[in-house]
């Protein structure tokens, strides 16, 4: 029953309490009024669920980026220091001029420029596919079986 009542509740604050109430009412395990005692504790538990969900998403981002070969530790450290690490982020934050100044300082100081977005394969990484009609394939004849019943 909880499997049905919990669908889609991860992104909705306080929804786990509603799912618990619905499950308790449907199964009749304990009185629904008893669930009200948990309401105060649920606020704190809900905050902790948000923290765990956020940390899980952060860890998953690092794992997938390492798995895909996109993880760059130096860029991560710069981002944690509050630096803008790529042109796309600068555009999104509306600080393109600051990013260009930062890049000029990095290059004039002998450091590498910030990497460009490396999120997808280049055209050279994608093999060419030739589309053609399949050759006519004849299927083998079915082996004779028992005679059909009447």
Image (cartoon, rainbow, N blue to C red):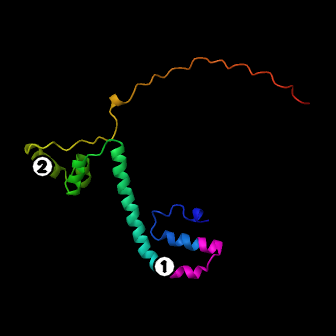
Q: Provide residue 136's location: percent of width, then percent of height.
A: 61, 17
Which quadrant is home to the N terminus?
bottom right
**Frontmost residue, 124 versus 141:** 141
Q: Residues within 10 Å of mark 1 (few under 14, many from 20)?
A: few
Tally of numbered discs? 2
Judging from the image, what secondary structure is the residue with disc 1 in? helix
Q: Main secondary structure of the magenta part?
A: helix
Classify 127 as above or below 23.
above
* Residue pictured at 48% horizontal, 79% vertical: 39
Q: Position of residue 131 (x, y in %)?
A: 48, 23
Residue 59 in the image, given as x and y percentages of width and height: 36, 55
Q: Check disc 2: other Cα within 10 Å, few if <14, some if 14-19, many if 20+.
A: few
In the depicted view, which residue is nearer to us: 51 or 135? 51
Q: Residue at x 38, y 53 (%)?
A: 60
Q: Decide if residue 73 is on the left or right side of residue 9.
A: left
Q: Which of marks 2 and 1 is in front?
A: 1
Q: Which residue is drawn at 50% across and 79% down?
A: 38
| Distance Cα–Cα, label 2 vs label 1 | 52 Å
Name the image quarter holding the C terminus. top right
Residue 29 disc label: none
- Which residue carries the number 1 mark? 39
Residue depicted at 37% across the width and 66% down the height: 51
Q: Residue 101 carries which label?
A: 2
The magenta-colored residue range is: 23-39
Q: Residue furthest right?
A: 150
Q: Indicate yes or no whether the magenta region holds residue 84.
A: no
Q: What element carries label 2?
A: helix
Label whose residue precedes the other's in the sequence (2 or 1): 1
């Amino acid at each position: 029953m909880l499997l049905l009542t919990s669908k889609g509740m991860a992104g909705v604050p306080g929804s786990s309490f509603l799912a618990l109430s619905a499950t308790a009412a449907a199964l009749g395990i304990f009185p629904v009024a008893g669930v009200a005692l948990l309401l105060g504790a649920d606020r704190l538990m809900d905050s902790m669920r948000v923290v765990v969900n956020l940390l899980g998403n952060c860890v998953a981002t690092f794992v997938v980026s390492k798995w895909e070969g996109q993880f760059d530790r130096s860029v991560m450290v710069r981002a944690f220091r509050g630096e803008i690490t790529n042109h796309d982020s600068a555009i999104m934050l509306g600080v393109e001029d600051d990013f260009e100044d930062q890049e000029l300082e990095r290059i004039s100081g002998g450091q590498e420029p910030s990497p460009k977005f490396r999120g997808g394969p280049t055209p050279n990484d994608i093999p060419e596919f030739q589309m053609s009609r399949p050759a006519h394939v004849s299927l083998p004849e079915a082996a004779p079986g028992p005679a059909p019943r009447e």
